[in-house]
Amino acid sequence: MLEDPTTAAPHPAPPSSWPATYPQGYAVVDVETTGLARDDRIVSAAVYQLDARGTVQDHWYTLVNPERDPGPVWIHGLTEEVLEGAPRFPEIAGELAERLADRVLVAHNAAFDWSMLAREYARSKSAAPVRQRLCTIALSKELGLPLPNHKLETLAAHYGVVQHRAHHALDDARVLAETFRPSLHRAAETGLRLPLLACQPLTEWSDGPAIGRQRSYRQTWRPSRKRPACPYPNPGRYEPGGQLVQGMRVAFSGDTSVDRELLEDRAIEAGLHVATSVSRLTSVLVTNDPDSPTSKTAKARSFGTPVIDEAAFMQLLQDVTPAPPTNR
């Protein structure tokens, strides 16, 4: 039986002064999925609503019919028979949105949970009302917790939180809520700036094939894609106010309103080189959140790499300058 929030570990005493910049509420989320690729689906979802100081207000859980095979049953335990009568995502999208609205989404490896939710909402022709997320892995690192690794079970053991059913969305969300609260209080005590990241809901999505896309279940949440080699030499950095030139190295950071793989495919089709990291050779970094504390934005600043947002990039893609002829 899953633990009820009223019987969970005792709440730590809140700091005498609470940072005024901290959010007013949180939605601790966990989703189980058919796999880890862009075309995989959610099979269950749970949300624990917390107030500004991390106290549980409510919790909610649902199965979701993924309309395809359930994927790694050996992990989440949800078979086709169990999911057959479950609601499809569009049927629970509204209720889930109510539980996410006006709250910071909190998850363990939040980029994964948010991307899965964003794609499900995009398929449903709607958008999740989430504007910021907080990853408990990032928070643990900021706090300098003495953890041998960043698994949820390790974080739970650190705070003495007992997990009953690993990879069950409701129990994982409950464990995460109980470990997030003391982390939040520790951050408040030290005046730590929370590692909040902006969330960009998807406005364009396609279930069609993408370059190098693979459907198999993998051990990392975002499978690597084999991209075709760019046939053009790197002409150098993008000049703000100018045009993109075929062969320029483009890197992306953070959420985009066009699904990332679609955006990368369009860049490749235009003759650009899509880079997975930022280096001195990067021509331009595309991000909707230039102030986010990510390694790519930090490197772009240190290298003086030009930074533009997604809207500007999409506009520039419409008229990319052909690569200059090479002397053979």
Image (cartoon, rainbow, N blue to C red):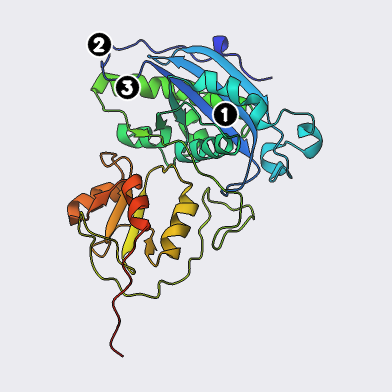
Q: Label 2: few (<14), some or many (≥20) within 10 Å? A: few
Q: Does 319 appear above or below 24? A: below
Disc 2 versus disc 3: nearer the observer: 2
Which image quarter: residue 309?
A: top left
Closer to the N terminus: mark 2 or mark 3? Answer: 2
Residue drawn at x 45%, y 58% is 266
Where does residue 113 sit, x and y in percent of width and height? Answer: 52, 36
Image quadrant where residue 53 sits: top left
Q: For mark 3, what is the residue? A: 186
279 horizontally vs 176: left or right: left
Which of the two discs, 1 and 2, labels the residue nearer the N terminus?
Answer: 2
Mark 3 lies on a secondary structure that is helix
Residue type at mark 3 is: Arg
Q: Residues within 10 Å of mark 1 (few under 14, many from 20)?
A: many
- Where is mark 1, residue-wise? 172
Q: Upstream in the sequence, badge 3 or badge 1?
A: 1
Position of 36 with respect to 286 (left or right) is: right
Q: CA distance from mark 1 to mark 2?
A: 30 Å
Q: Nearer the viewer, residue 137 or 158?
A: 137
Residue 50's disc number = none
Give how far apart the Cα atoms at labels 3 and 1 are: 21 Å
The three-letter code of the residue at mark 2 reads Ser
Q: How many marks?
A: 3
Residue on which disc 2 sits = 17
Q: Residue lying farthest right?
A: 81
Q: Is residue 255 above or below residue 228?
A: above
Where, quadrant-wise, is the N terminus in this rendering? top right
Mark 2 to mark 3 CA distance (whole Å) = 12 Å
Residue at x-position 31% and y-position 65%: 248
